[in-house]
Image: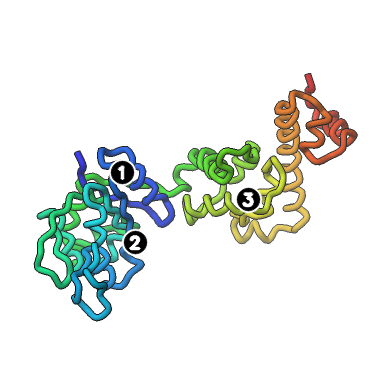
């Protein structure tokens, strides 16, 4: 069944990605997926974008009128992000669409049937808004036939390594992409990510731009990721912090050398070139870290 869905989650948790995925796995997948951010437009403009308008409906209206997003999404899915931001007037019009499955363009008296699945999303507590009189109760129950609650990234840290590798791979479609060490992934998993998936994705893009090597380790993460420690911990002497980073970097360096050696089938010349160091330096580090070389 193509039931309406309400996605609830903090900003940046990936609500639109989930909506697109739901559409892509539905029977409507070969038809349009139309997304609009209800908070991004003023009320009058949002109304004309959603429902369209007839020729001459207002000053500046296009000749021949314009289709709205509901018409464009016919037989497909419309995604209404930030649904809690729409005005009472638009709430009433949206309720009619949900009830009657038809729309009327602004300035027109022609009724247009629409066959759309509605997926709405919000970062607000709509139940509290209903109790406060800021959101229509009947509209809320129409939208929330199925609820999907997306927890923030800090509550699903086990997803972070998977997401990181996906974002890095997406940056290099069809090409070999840099490897990220386990120590680096562990460091990323400890960050707070207040901006959730969006912040993590942007940080991965920053790594791809700024890191020139084939291996991303904890040292690269420490250079570009804000320190998650408390203010008190940030006041520790600089040298102590530097020693901590050095110790973590040493652990990841061993891991990095082992991985490159394995990829190069333990050819030390190729591995040294890959790591950007001389053979002598590589031999010294192999002995230092007691790395088996087959």
Crowdedness near tag 3: few (<14), some (14–19) or many (≥20) residues, C-alpha within 10 Å: some
Q: Where the C terminus falls, by quadrant?
A: top right
Which one is in front, 73 or 289? 73
- Residue 132 visible in the snapshot: no
User: Relative to 222, does residue 64 appear above or below in the rendering?
Assistant: below
> Left or right: 276 with respect to 184?
right
Residue at which label 3 appears: 207
Q: Is residue 168 visible?
A: yes
Rendered image: mark on residue 37 = 2
Labels 3 and 2: the sequence-earlier one: 2
Q: Residue at x 87, y 33 (%)?
A: 279
Q: Position of residue 252 (x, y in %)?
A: 71, 38
**In terms of image quadrants, where is residue 53?**
bottom left
Q: Residues within 10 Å of mark 1 (few under 14, many from 20)?
A: many
Q: Which mark is residue 233?
A: none
Most extreme residue toward the bottom, as rendered?
59
Q: Secondary structure at mark 1?
A: helix
Q: Are marks 2 and 1 in contact (CB under 8 Å)?
A: no
Which residue is at 51% across, 42% downward? 163
Q: Secondary structure at mark 3?
A: helix
Residue picked out by circle 1: 23
Mark 2–mark 1 Cα distance, whole angstroms, equals 17 Å
Q: For the residues carrying marks 1 and 3, which lies nearer the camera in this image?
A: 1
Looking at the image, is mark 2 or mark 1 earlier in the sequence?
A: 1
In the figure, residue 175 lies in which quadrant? top right
Nearest the viewer among 123 and 128 is 123
Q: CA distance from mark 3 to mark 2?
A: 29 Å
Q: Residue at x 20, y 67 (%)?
A: 90
Observer-nearest of 260 and 106: 106
């Amino acid at each position: 069944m193509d039931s309406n869905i309400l996605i609830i989650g903090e900003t940046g948790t990936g609500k639109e990605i989930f909506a697109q995925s739901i559409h892509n796995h539905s029977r409507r997948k070969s038809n349009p997926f139309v997304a609009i951010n209800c908070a991004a437009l003023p009320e009058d403009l949002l109304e004309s974008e959603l429902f369209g308008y007839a020729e001459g409906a207002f000053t500046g209206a296009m000749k021949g009128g314009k289709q709205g997003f509901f018409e464009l999404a016919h037989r497909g899915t419309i995604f209404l992000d930030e649904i809690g931001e729409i005005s009472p007037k638009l709430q009433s019009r949206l309720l009619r669409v949900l009830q009657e499955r038809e729309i009327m363009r602004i300035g027109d008296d022609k009724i247009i049937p629409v066959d759309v699945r509605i997926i709405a999303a919000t970062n607000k507590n709509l139940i509290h808004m209903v109790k406060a009189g800021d959101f229509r109760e009947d509209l809320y129950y129409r939208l929330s036939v199925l609820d999907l609650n997306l927890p923030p990234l800090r509550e699903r840290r086990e997803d972070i390594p998977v997401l990181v590798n996906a974002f890095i791979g997406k940056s290099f479609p069809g090409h070999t992409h840099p490897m990220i060490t386990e120590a680096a992934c562990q460091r990323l998993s400890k960050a707070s990510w207040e901006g959730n998936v969006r912040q993590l994705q942007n940080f991965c893009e920053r790594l791809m731009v700024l890191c020139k090597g084939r291996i991303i380790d904890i040292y690269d993460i420490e250079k570009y990721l804000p320190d998650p420690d408390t203010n008190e911990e940030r006041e520790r002497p600089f040298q102590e912090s530097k020693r901590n980073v050095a110790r973590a970097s040493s652990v990841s360096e061993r891991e990095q050398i082992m991985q490159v050696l394995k990829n190069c089938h333990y050819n030390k010349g190729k591995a040294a070139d890959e790591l950007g160091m001389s053979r002598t330096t590589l031999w010294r580090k192999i002995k230092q870290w007691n790395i088996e070389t087959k």
